[in-house]
Every structure is written in C-alpha cells, then in structure tokens.
Image: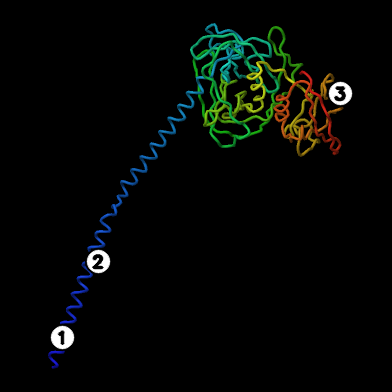
Amino acid sequence: MYIYSQRKKRIEKILIICVIIILAILVGIKLFQIYRGIPITDFTTVKAERLSQTVDMKKQEDVTITQMLENVTNCVVGVSKLKDNGSTIFMENGVSQMGIGSGVIISENGYILTNEHVSGPKNSTCYVTMEDGKNYNANVVWSDMNLDLAIIKINMKCVSYAILGDSDLVSVGESAYAIGNPIGFEFQKTVTSGIISALNRTIIFKENTQTENGVNNEENEHEVFMSNLIQTDATINPGNSGGPLINNNGEIIGINTVKITSAEGIGFAVPINVIKPIIQKLENEGNFEEASIGVFAYDKDVIPYLDSNINFDTGIYIAQISLDSPAFTSGLQIGDVITKIDDISLEKMCDLREYIYSKNIGDTVILTVLRNNREKTIEVQLSRK
C-alpha cells in the first residue's frame, strides 16, 4: 500500500511538471506570434531617416526663400537723378553725382517707392531703370525730406509689384533682407541678409546747403534728426538706398535709407507703415493732397538730445509751429505735448504723420495736449501743407 501511494504521488508530480511545460510552450508560442508582428527598430536607420528629413526640410526652406527673393528682386529698379548714359558707380563720386539708388515697384499702376535723396523733391523728374535695362522718365508725386521718402510714377503697367508688410509687427532678432539695384548694373539685384537689430532708433547727422558751384556751405550747417528707424545688420551699400527691407514672407517692412559709415553692420530703414495711407490714396484716387496741422514734434527718445531738462512720459513734444498753420491759429504752443489725436494715443512722430496722412484737407481733429502738467483738448482743422 505504501509503495502504491508513493508511485501515485510521483505520477501526479510528473503530470504537473508536464502540464507546466506544455503551458510554458503555449505561452512562448503566443508571445512569439505577438512580438513577431512588431517591427524591430534599427536605430541607425531611424537616425539616417531623420537626418534625411531634416536635409529635405532645409532644402525646401532654401527653395522657398530663394523663390521669395526672386519674386521681390523682380520688383526692384534703379533710380537716378540723371539719365543713365553708361556711367558707372565706380566713377569718382559716381553715386553722389548721379543720385544713384534703388526703388521698389509697389503698384501695377507704376508707383515706385524710394528715398527723397535719390529721387529729388516733389514735382521734380528722375529716371528709372527697369530689370530689362530700359529707362523711363519718372515724376516725383510725393516726397518728405524729414522721412527721406518719395513716391515716383512711371507711365506703364507693371506686372510685378511688391507686397507691403506691417512694420508694427516687426520684432528684434527676426530675419531681414535688404535689396538694391544700382544704376550701373555692376551689382544688379544685390541681396544682403541679416536680422532686425533694434527698433525705434534715432540718428543725428549734420546737413548743409551747397553753393552754386557745389561747395558745401558750412555756415548753413544744421543737425537733422531721423527717428523711429528700423536698425538692421543686413548690409546697406551705396545704391541700396531706396530699396526694400523685407521679411521672410517677402513683404516690405521698411525702405533702406542710410548706414553708419564708421561701423560695420549698422544700417537703417524707414518703417513702411508711415507711408501706407499715401499709397492707398494714390491707388484709389490717383492723387494725394497732403493735409497738415503745421507742427514739428519730437519723440521722448529724441528730446534728451535737444534739452535734457524736458521730461515727459508719453506723447510728442511740439518744437516748431508754422505761423500760417492751423496749429498756430488754434492756440497750440511750442512746449505742448500732444498725447492723443482723436483719442488715439501717440508715442512717436510717425504715429502723428501716419494718422494725418489718412485724413483730408478740411477735416477736423481733436488733440489732447499736456501744457504745464494740465491736460486740455484743442480742435484743429487741417489745411493744405
């Protein structure tokens, strides 16, 4: 009996072991079937694929930027005060003597944006050299020496014209491209790249008149302030003046105007927003009659250069008033600080210009003014500038 009991226990133990082995085999088979459906990762292959995707994205980005730049450069023209007669920017004082610079087509109706120092003043004539080398007479339909901007017009339909961006949305550090098209064509369609280095910059330079024989008249030398400028390290060379400063979308955010000759990588452009209302009126109405208050005011960032004793937190400081202007007859005074116009806050002189450019001669505006630390409102009817 004892022997039978021992044999029975041994058989049961063997059966249990067999069942466990069978179950282990079945579980192993099931796990193999499951994991066989999961692809084995080759990390070398994955790294190569990711690198390939990065390279493809970079190539696509380069193609996009290249195409964007090509589209804009097709809109850039040469502008000169003298008709192109084969002269070159390598001639002695070539750039200054010929007034060589650039411009950018901003309308299919033949409107071109440039610098005033390139085109000359309003109602004068300049010359435009198109991409194909053909020359056209152009009329200066608007200009402002304080902004160093001008709009000229040629009598032709333009297939390509640039898109205006929003200079109020520009941020320090974003990419920027400066494009120029010198008349001599040695460096046609020059593109330089960089970043937006700073905003709302003010520069001061001395300007003097010239005698009839072209000699500088130092007795009439005076300081000129240009404010609210966009600073960029994209190189602005002679001939780039009047050309566009654009963003990554190919939109004009400024017009190149000047560079600091004593340092590398410091150039400036006038923000595009200030001139948008004029362009819109020229497009819609075919002409632009400039309305005016009759004041010249400085930003709070410029005032310390003039008088360190003048302090204000917001607004623009009236430094000059024309005697035959609505500002004078309405009671505005030198020393007043304009904080608002029609309840729109003012921080920069460009803010006032941009708003006035959108109004018409005869329109009435309400100015909020600080005088002797007291706020008052003054009604002004705009007149012809």
Density class for disc 2 (Cα within 10 Å; few <14, some 14-19, many ≥20) is few
Q: In this view of the protein, which residue sits in the foreground, 251 or 214?
A: 251
Kind of residue at disc 2: Val
* Residue 128 appears in the rendering: yes
Density class for disc 3 (Cα within 10 Å; few <14, some 14-19, many ≥20) is few
Q: In this rendering, would 34 be left or right of 311?
A: left
Expressed as whole percent of the image width and height from the top left, the position of residue 88 reads: 53, 11
Viewer-side label of 3, 1: 1
Q: Secondary structure at mark 2?
A: helix
Density class for disc 1 (Cα within 10 Å; few <14, some 14-19, many ≥20) is few
Which color scheme does this rendered protein use? rainbow
Q: Earlier in the sequence, mark 3 or mark 1?
A: 1
Q: In this rendering, would 373 be left or right of 123?
A: right
Q: In this view of the protein, which residue sits in the foreground, 107 or 372?
A: 107
Residues tagged 1 and 2 counted as in contact (Cβ below 8 A): no
Residue 57, above or below 280: below
Q: Secondary structure at mark 1?
A: helix
Residues tagged 3 and 1 counted as in contact (Cβ below 8 A): no
Expressed as whole percent of the image width and height from the top left, the position of residue 133 reads: 50, 11
Q: Secondary structure at mark 3?
A: helix
Kind of residue at disc 3: Thr
The residue positioned 25% from the left and 66% from the top of the image is 27
Q: Earlier in the sequence, mark 1 or mark 2?
A: 1
Q: Which residue is mark 2?
A: 27
The residue positioned 41% from the left and 37% from the top of the image is 57
Expressed as whole percent of the image width and height from the top left, the position of residue 284 reads: 64, 20
Q: Which residue is mark 1?
A: 8
Q: Earlier in the sequence, mark 2 or mark 3?
A: 2
Q: Which residue is mark 3?
A: 329
Kind of residue at disc 1: Lys
**Residue 5 position by quadrant:** bottom left
